[in-house]
Amino acid sequence: MSRQADSRNEVAERIGYITRVQSFSACHRLHSPTLSDEVNKRIFGKCNNPNGHGHNYKVEVTVRGKIDRHTGMVMNITDLKQHIEEVIMIPLDHKNLDKDVPYFANVVSTTENVAVYIWDNMVKQLPANLLYEVKIHETDKNIVVYRGQ
Ligand SMILES: Nc1nc2c(c(=O)[nH]1)N=C([C@H](O)[C@H](O)COP(=O)(O)OP(=O)(O)OP(=O)(O)O)CN2
Ligand SMILES: [Zn+2]
């Protein structure tokens, strides 16, 4: 091993990324309380159906941080699983997002806003500066990324 590599092994910090994937099922209706019924129908089309529609969402939660030289981990995935259970599964799985989740009473339940909801709650639970990205597959074709900006 070269001297440079030796010195990197001794002092340099390695940055790693961990992604945990979690699926949940929920229904919703795209409808903005700040727009008329007519405009809602025009903008959201079939997704404004008064009785709603459902998705099998797939969420990817990514954390970024130093690989601890003692544990070999950015964070323990067992802990990440527990946070995902509390932030995603308990409040959102098998729920009507608009009616069961108070946050969406006045916030349109687009996938962008679901990603913001997950980010805002996940960031409260994780150690500072660890959360990197929330990616949601609403369908196989519709994917949203939010990085807290
Ligand atoms: N910017 C956004 N646009 C739309 C969202 C959203 O969350 N953000 N959501 C919807 C609808 O809720 C719905 O998810 C769209 O479903 P659909 O068009 O059926 O999904 P696909 O594109 O995968 O289906 P195809 O019919 O095969 O194209 C709409 N817009
Ligand atoms: Zn939808």
Image (cartoon, grey):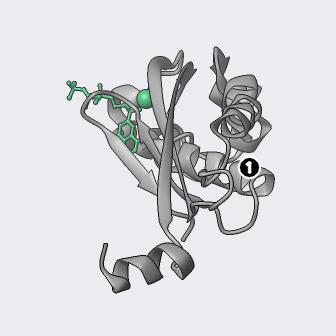
Q: Residue at x 45, y 29 (%)?
A: 58
User: Quick one: which residue is furthest to the left in this view?
Assistant: 141
Q: Residue at x 40, y 36 (%)?
A: 41
Q: Nearer the viewer, residue 92 or 98?
A: 92
Residue 48 in the image, given as x and y percentages of width and height? 45, 30
Q: Residue at x 34, y 42 (%)?
A: 143
Residue 129 in the image, given as x and y percentages of width and height? 66, 68
Q: Quadrant of the C terminus?
A: bottom right
Residue 80 in the image, given as x and y percentages of width and height? 67, 40
Q: Nearer the viewer, residue 42 or 64?
A: 64
Q: State which quadrant residue 89 falls in.
A: top right
Residue 54 in the image, given as x and y percentages of width and height? 47, 17
In-image side of 107 versus 60 (left or right): right
Q: State which quadrant residue 46 falls in.
A: top left
Q: Residue at x 70, y 46 (%)?
A: 106
In-image side of 10 versus 103 (left or right): left
Count of numbered marks:
1
Which residue matches tag 1? 121
115 w.r.t. 66: above or below: above
Element on which disc 1 rests = helix
Question: In terms of image quarters, where does ligand 2 lie?
Answer: top left
Q: Quadrant of the N terminus?
A: bottom left
107 w.r.t. 105: above or below: below
76 w.r.t. 71: above or below: above
